[in-house]
Amino acid sequence: MRLGKFGIATMASIAMIACLVTAASAEPLPVQQGPGNSVILKRILERGAINIGHREASVPFSYISDEQKVEGYSVDLCIKVVDAVRQRLNKPDLKVTFTPINVTNRIPLVANGTIDLECGTTSNFLTRQEQVEFSPIFYVTGTQLLVKAASATREIEDLKGRRVAALQGSSNEAAIRKLNDEKALGVQLVYVKDLPEGALLVENDRVDAFVADGVQIKVYAATKAKPAGSLAVVGRLLTYDPYSAMMQRGDQDFALLVRGAFADAFRSGEAEKTYARWFDPLGLKIEGELLAAFRVQALPR
């Protein structure tokens, strides 16, 4: 093929543009510094601390240890966000403060800005996204039943006319209410403030079952049941509960920083290591569904 002067010049121009594009794409994007337009980052900078909301007894996700330290799988992942905030604000000594939360007050405290980042066991639902922003998904579970090991109960339908404990305002309560109405089970709901209280009611025969997220009651049954082996987790998953961290809605700069920190943890394998630290000792190896969620959300920089 013969090229005239115009053709040669055109090809040369295309080659030059391609080289420039390649060179530009090879250059790392500049890391933004300072709070920028983020209301949350400005608030953190002014306060000199990032305020994290945590649960008090959601082992091993977010809880207060015997040494009175806030710790857990969710908390460890959120600390990766704290590190990203420190880098963004150029504040390596930025303090972390902790505020205890529960099922009732967690969304209001995030929505009104009292808490900068909630690190617990909150399910990421579209209806909740109308009130708050969510991080990427870092755990997947669903509603199951905690019962006495000797109980004949195997599914929710076996609890017709029985007393069942639930955390008021939780997705577990909503699921039981829905099934109660649909199947006319006549279940009597008893409200509790946290998981240990619900489990205690089962142990003391004050309720026939406690409905909660399967992973949490599995951990309790394996580590806290008295005597050991006296509790069991039964039944199909009644809900799909993907856990995410919450933050105030409408701050896209902060949301992007949070998503970036989680994506980095998924991509580098740090999220898997964090999971292994908290769950492997409990005999809960990472499952394919969660591993797939990590990989799908491991967005490149």
Image (cartoon, grey):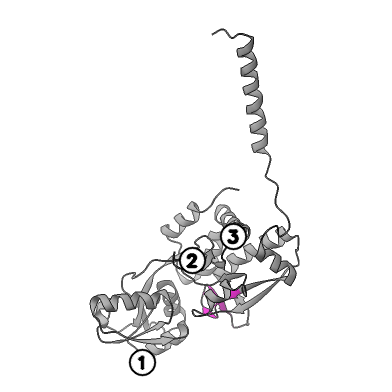
Work out whether residue 223 or residue 63 is closer to the camera in this orientation and state it.
63
Q: Give the range drawn in magenta.
A: 53-66
Which callout, 3 or 2, points to the residue nearer the camera?
2
Q: Which amino acid does label 2 sit on?
A: Glu
Is residue 226 visible in this depiction of the protein? Answer: no
Q: Dot 3, crowdedness within 10 Å: few (<14), some or many (≥20)? A: many
Residue 216 sits in quarter: bottom left
Mark carried by residue 206: 1
The residue identified by callout 2 is 130
Q: Does 105 sit left or right of 144 as displayed?
A: right
The residue identified by callout 3 is 255
**Labels 3 and 1: the sequence-earlier one:** 1
Q: Does 123 sit left or right of 81 as displayed?
A: left
Q: Which amino acid does label 3 sit on?
A: Ala
Would you say the residues marked 1 and 2 are in contact, meaning their CB atoms lie under 8 Å apart?
A: no
Q: Name the residue located 51 percent from the left edge and 65 percent from the top edge.
A: 244
Which callout, 3 or 1, points to the residue nearer the camera?
3
Q: Dot 2, crowdedness within 10 Å: few (<14), some or many (≥20)? A: few
Would you say the residues marked 3 and 1 are in contact, meaning their CB atoms lie under 8 Å apart?
A: no
* Above or below 204: residue 213: above
Tell me where residue 257 appears, x and y as whole percent.
Answer: 62, 58
Q: Name the residue located 47 percent from the left edge and 66 percent from the top edge.
A: 124
Mark carried by residue 252: none
SS at circle 1: loop
Residue 246 sits in quarter: bottom right
Q: What residue type is labelled 1?
A: Arg
The Cα atoms of the two marked residues, 3 and 1, are separated by 43 Å
The Cα atoms of the two marked residues, 1 and 2, are separated by 37 Å
